[in-house]
Image (tube, helix red, strand yellow):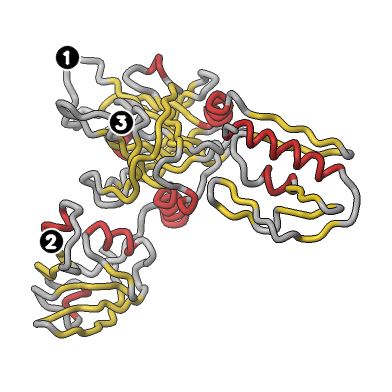
Amino acid sequence: MTKANLIKALCITAALAFMTTGTYAAGASVLKIDGRQIKDAVREINGKQYVLVDSLKDNLEGISITGNGGTVEINTDINKISNIINQVSPSVVGIIGKLKESSYDYSEYTDNLVFGTGVIYRSDGYIITNAHVVKDMDSIVVVLSNSKAYKARLKAIDESLDLAVVKIDKGGLKPAVFGDMSSVAVGQEVVAIGTPLSFNLRNSATRGIISGMNRSADGEYRFIQSDAAINGGNSGGPLVNMKGQVIGINSVKLVGFGVEGLNFSIPVDTVKYAIGHFEKFGKIKRPYLGIVFSESIAAQYGLPSAVEGLTVRDIKEGSPASEYDIETDDKLVSVNGVKVNSIIDYNEEMKKYLPGDRAALKLVRDGRQLVVNVVFGEK
């Protein structure tokens, strides 16, 4: 039996369970969907076993089940990708503007128009995009999926995260639904939506799978890797799961002879972190110690290694770290018990803290361990 037929068979059984009356008891049988156990999903009714409707509709992608007045309606979603694109597209915008004359890429021989993509996250006109899309952009204009255009203002930007927020004076917009990284896994199908190559191609969609997690991609933070095709102009657009939830913001594509399908997106947890800081502080408030670290060659190339920790290469004069028992050539092994083996590990861990917060740094010096309690400053 194919997976599609199995799903249909389960749904029919569920409908019978919904409409059947009689004594029931929790059975010994266990329902598993794609290897994942669903709690309390099987019931025994008059000696027969049934699957609860709610258990299926909450845990199966590709079908929708509704119950009203004793009637159960089951819809198998054979146009899943199309429906997802239709669901998400109203929350995706094109962003266009002119390069500032101070930009490195500015040329007096071209029109200097640049464009990208953004995602509406608040109905009152707040849009998340990449920092590299808007940082050198003058006269920013946002074009909605209905082709209506609005002038936009840059509200916040952080180049290290490659995220920025722009605002248009327009209400009643449809905000995107953000997913959660805890449900994201290698092999899952994804859709990328954006404005590749030409503004005439805005809200183009491509399909792929998640190829890897926790990738560095030459950035300061972790990325999701996928093979959903993205091109110039896709930057700032959403990477969407099969529930129509945004799980990433498309940011980087590796290019070169023989290179294909190496595309990277900023994980949704990082996006939520940035939005939270932008809305509360107007910027990213990073904890600061003033330590310059170096990582092992193995960490740089993502190789397994018995060498742990980051090496303290320099301590900035007058920085918070200069007030504590921290020396050059010390190895930082963990922060509050969380191991750090790369600079990206450290940067990701720092997202948990604000200036003024405290943390216990475990260091190794001349073969012995010591713990230094620090209070983070602000750069």
Tell me what residue is drawn at x 40 percent, y 14 percent.
200
Quadrant of the image containing the C terminus = bottom left
Left or right: 208 in relation to 102: right
Whether residue 223 is visible here, answered yes or no, is yes
Amino acid at pointer 2: Ser
Q: Which mark is residue 296?
A: 2
Nearest the viewer among 351 and 47 is: 47
Vertical placement of 321 versus 275: above or below?
A: below
Q: Residues within 10 Å of mark 1 (few under 14, many from 20)?
A: few
Cα separation, mark 3 vs mark 1, equals: 17 Å
Query: Tag 2's secondary structure?
Result: loop
Vertical placement of 330 versus 92: above or below?
A: below
Give the mark, 2 or 1, whose residue is nearer the N terminus.
1
Vertical placement of 108 versus 27: above or below?
A: above
Tell me what residue is drawn at x 42 percent, y 56 percent.
281
Query: Tag 1's secondary structure?
Result: loop
Q: Position of residue 119 (x, y in %)?
A: 47, 35
Quadrant of the image containing the N terminus = top right
Q: Position of residue 190 (x, y in %)?
A: 45, 35
Which image quarter: residue 250? top left
Q: Position of residue 282 (x, y in %)?
A: 41, 52
Q: Which mark is residue 137?
A: 3
Report the label total. Answer: 3
**Residue underneath mark 1:** 109
Cα separation, mark 2 vs mark 1, equals: 46 Å
Which image quarter: residue 37? bottom right
Give the mark, 3 or 2, whose residue is nearer the N terminus.
3
Amino acid at pointer 3: Met
